[in-house]
């Protein structure tokens, strides 16, 4: 997918965001996990967030959801700064801002039937049992699960099916933005592809926006309009998905691309070409640097 900022109407804008975790345990001092983060996401747009482990991807997603200690900057959602929203304001915001986590095995309450898992956010927001039941049926259909899933427990489902339940729960209140934190990383490759296509289909049908966290460049290229690359709590590069994931400018992104595994045989050819071009670019840069030195 390719697109530019201008093609989408702004939904979320993060400006100069800083997050600092209070010190505890082995880290006695407060830890600055994010500094000077600037990103935006338009309506119906997906911003992919990549970077190595510990670079701050999850923290940025959590800061957008109000779950990380923001110490500076703004999180502007539909024109309002929500970085310091109160609990009451957060409850209201949860209609518009939702999350899908990585692990479909721990993110669903094992004791609840799927129907109850999906009805929970609806009843919290004041829907009647009849309204909730109707919506639950719609949601199961939307994520491709059978109607009889309503009275079954999470353990009766595969990882991919459980992730469909988690997606349905996130969709229950028709949110405007879903933070997707590595939502396909725990799934096998063929299931990953199917679930990614489900995310795309839902976006086409509903116009929802995604902040899509992943360490996998192939995954973010497939799902994202634009990609931001995180390194040590900052963003080092962002731009159209194809450009950033195939022809990155920043040396860190180039390293990320060279280091990332090539799981899907269909994409190996393309990746070999990308690697070859990048290595050649690096060789030429090294040669130029040697001449200048
Ligand atoms: N609750 C917390 N308290 C203190 N430090 C934290 C906390 N959560 C995360 N960190 C630290 O903040 C940094 C960023 O972590 P974060 O989980 O956001 O990175 P990430 O890029 O999502 O990593 P991964 O891909 O491994 O999930 C790390 O150094 C981590 O140790």
Image (cartoon, rainbow, N blue to C red):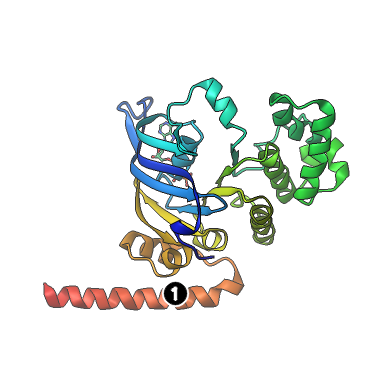
Residue 270 rendering spot, x and y as whole percentages: 51, 76
Above or below, 93 against 225 in this view is above
Q: Name the residue under label 1.
A: 274
Camera-side residue of 223 and 192: 223
Position in image of residue 237 (x %, y %): 36, 57
Q: Residue extending furthest left? A: 293
* 194 on left or right of 33: right
x%, y% of residue 218? 53, 63
Front residue of this view, candidates 129 and 187: 129
Residue positioned 59% across, 44% down in the render: 102
Quarter containing ligand 1? Answer: top left
Q: In which quarter of the image is the N terminus?
A: bottom right
* Depicted 130 relative to depicted 44: above or below: above
On screen, residue 101 versus residue 148, left or right, reads left
Question: Which one is nearer the viewer's eye here, 69 or 132?
Answer: 132
Specify whether residue 182 is in view: no
On the image, the x and y values in percent for residue 104 come to 67, 42
Residue 207 seen in the figure: yes
Q: Classify residue 128 by image quadrant.
A: top right
Mark 1 nearby-residue class (10 Å; few <14, some 14–19, many ≥20): some
């Amino acid at each position: 997918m390719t697109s530019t900022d201008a093609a989408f109407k702004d939904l979320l804008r993060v400006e100069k965001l800083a997050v600092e975790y209070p010190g505890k345990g082995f880290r006695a001092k407060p830890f600055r996990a994010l500094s000077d983060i600037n990103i935006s996401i338009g309506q119906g747009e997906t911003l992919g967030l990549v970077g190595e482990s510990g670079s701050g991807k999850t923290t940025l997603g959590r800061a957008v959801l109000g779950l990380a200690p923001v110490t500076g900057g703004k999180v502007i959602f539909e024109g309002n700064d929500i970085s310091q929203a109160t609990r009451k304001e957060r409850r209201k915001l949860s209609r518009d801002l939702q999350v899908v986590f990585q692990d479909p095995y721990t993110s669903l309450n094992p004791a609840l039937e799927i129907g109850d898992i999906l009805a929970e956010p609806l009843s919290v927001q004041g829907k009647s049992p009849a309204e909730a039941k109707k919506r639950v049926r719609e949601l199961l259909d939307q994520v491709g699960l059978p109607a009889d899933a309503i009275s079954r427990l999470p353990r009766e489902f595969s990882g991919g099916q459980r992730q469909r339940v988690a997606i349905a729960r996130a969709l229950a209140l028709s949110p405007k933005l879903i933070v997707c934190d590595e939502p396909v990383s725990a799934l096998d490759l063929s299931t990953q592809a199917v679930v990614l296509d489900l995310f795309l289909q839902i976006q086409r049908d509903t116009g929802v926006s995604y902040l899509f966290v992943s360490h996998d460049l192939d995954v973010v290229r497939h799902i994202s309009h634009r990609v931001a690359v995180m390194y040590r709590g900052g963003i080092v590069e962002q731009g159209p998905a194809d450009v950033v994931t195939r022809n990155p400018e920043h040396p860190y992104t180039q390293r990320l691309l060279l280091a990332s595994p090539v799981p899907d045989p269909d994409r190996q050819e393309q990746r070999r070409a990308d690697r070859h071009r990048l290595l050649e670019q690096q060789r030429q840069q090294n040669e130029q640097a040697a001449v200048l030195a």
